[in-house]
Each structure stands twice: as structure tokens, then as C-alpha cells.
Amino acid sequence: MKMVLSNCGRIRSIYRNYTFKTNYINIVYTVSRINLLQRNSLLQI
């Protein structure tokens, strides 16, 4: 029973790290997209 609990905790921590990384990548991607859009609009003006 202890083995199952430890495995669940490990999977949960891996899942948390994975979701955190994907969220971070999404944030960086959106920020870079916004920066590119702002730069393009400045060039158009």
C-alpha cells in the first residue's frame, strides 16, 4: 500500500512540474507574440 501511495505522489509531482512548464511556455509565447505585434504596429505607424 505504501508503494502505491509513493507512486501516486511521484506521478502527481511530475504532473505538476509538467503543467507548470507548459503554462510557463504558453506565457512566454504569448508575451513574445504581443511584443512582436507591438513592434509591427510601431513600424506601420
Image: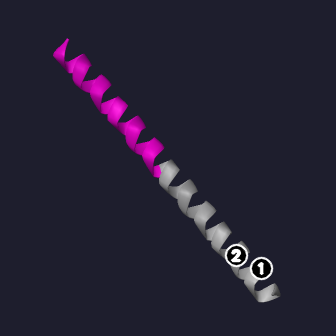
Q: Quadrant of the N terminus?
A: bottom right
Q: Please tell me whether residue 30 belongs to the stretch shown in magenta.
A: yes
Query: Splitting the image into 4 quarters, where does residue 11 fall?
Result: bottom right
Outermost residue toward the left in this view: 44
Identify the residue at horizontal 51%, vertical 49% (top origin).
Answer: 24
Q: Where is residue 33 in the image (x, y as percent from the top left)?
A: 33, 36
The residue tagged with tag 1: helix, strand or loop? helix
Query: Splitting the image into 4 quarters, where does residue 14 fall?
Result: bottom right
Identify the residue at horizontal 25%, vertical 17% (top origin).
Answer: 42
Q: In which quarter of the image is the C terminus?
A: top left
* Colour theme: one colour
State the mark number for residue 8. 2
Q: What stretch is highlighted in magenta?
A: 25-45
Identify the residue at horizontal 44%, vertical 46% (top origin).
Answer: 26
Q: Where is residue 21 in the image (x, y as percent from the top left)?
A: 52, 57
Mark 2, residues whose alpha carbon is within 10 Å: few (<14), some, or many (≥20)?
A: few
Say left or right for 4 vs 20: right
Q: Please tell me whether residue 28 belongs to the stretch shown in magenta.
A: yes
Residues under numbered marks 1 and 2 in contact, where contact means CB atoms less than 8 Å apart: yes
Identify which amino acid the numbered label 1 is placed on: Leu
Mark 1, residues whose alpha carbon is within 10 Å: few (<14), some, or many (≥20)?
A: few
Residue 13 vertical placement versus 24 (above, below): below
Total numbered circles: 2
Identify which amino acid the numbered label 2 is placed on: Cys
Say left or right for 45 vs 4: left
Q: Name the residue under label 1.
A: 5
Residue 32 vertical placement versus 16 (above, below): above
